[in-house]
Amino acid sequence: MRLLSGQRAFVLQRLSALVLLAGVAAATLRLAFGAPAGLAEFRAWAAQPLAAAVLLLLAGALFLHAWVGVRDVVLDYVHPLPLRTAVLLLVAGALVLLGGWTAVIVVTHAL
Amino acid sequence: MSSERPLFLNFARLRFPVGAVASIGHRISGVLLFLTLPFWVWALERSLRSERPFDWHIGPLARVALFLLAWAAAHHLFAGIRHLLSDVDIGSSLRASRASAWAALIGALAVGLAALVLP
């Protein structure tokens, strides 16, 4: 857990927030000013290797951001050490599984 | 001064200014977004793989869920931008921070309501 605590967690939380903010801004601008886009366009775009890399970067930022945020909440409210460890392990396991599933979805779509 | 401190955290008597509401909302919406992560990943999979991914009837319960998800995403975004700006000391005066807190709260509710009306 040392890997993602203290100042490093603080910095990563803000860096990942900026990456996600850029993603949300780009998607919003595309929807607001581009040609009307449907699911077919999204699929064609996501099938490109570079787009898949962007989606993986955004997913990585999202799951990292979620881990630091939920970890902060758990440290604030769950005090008994065995329970805290169990909850953190459960959260970490869920994030690893969901992150892996996301990567499989994005990569298999682009292949 | 120290004798003025409350001995009990009585929530009915705690002062909860608008900045605190925006801040706790950021935390609550973040937890909500985390708890609904399986749904977001599933939605990504459906939108990439299925021909007609979201062809369903939207009942009253789904509308409440839709409002909550849109509100949570928007509030976490707006309040998060507010926190990032205050990290670099933008909008830290009491007046500006109260104004931005109101903007985040109202903007997020507006996005939630828009999600109810649009589809």
Image: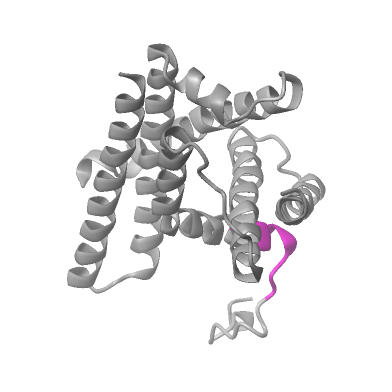
| Magenta span | B15-23
Quarter occupied by residue A33: top right
Q: Is residue B60 magenta?
A: no
The answer to which image quadrant residue A85 occupies is: bottom left
Q: Position of residue A3 (x, y in %)?
A: 22, 39
- Residue A64 visible in the picture: yes
The residue positioned 65% from the left and 25% from the top of the image is: A37
| Observer-nearest of B111 and A37 | A37
On the image, the x and y values in percent for residue B100 come to 76, 46
> How far across and down, in percent of the image, does residue B88 sit?
61, 32
Q: Is residue B14 left or right of residue A94?
A: right
In this view, B66 is above or below A55 = below
Q: Tell me what residue is drawn at x 61 percent, y 23 percent.
A: A26
Quadrant in which the C terminus of chain A is drawn: top left
B93 vs B73, left or right, is: right
In the image, residue B79 above or below residue A84: above
Q: Position of residue A23 (x, y in %)?
A: 55, 27
- Principal secondary structure, stretch drawn in magenta: helix
Q: Nearer the viewer, residue A91 or B52?
A: B52
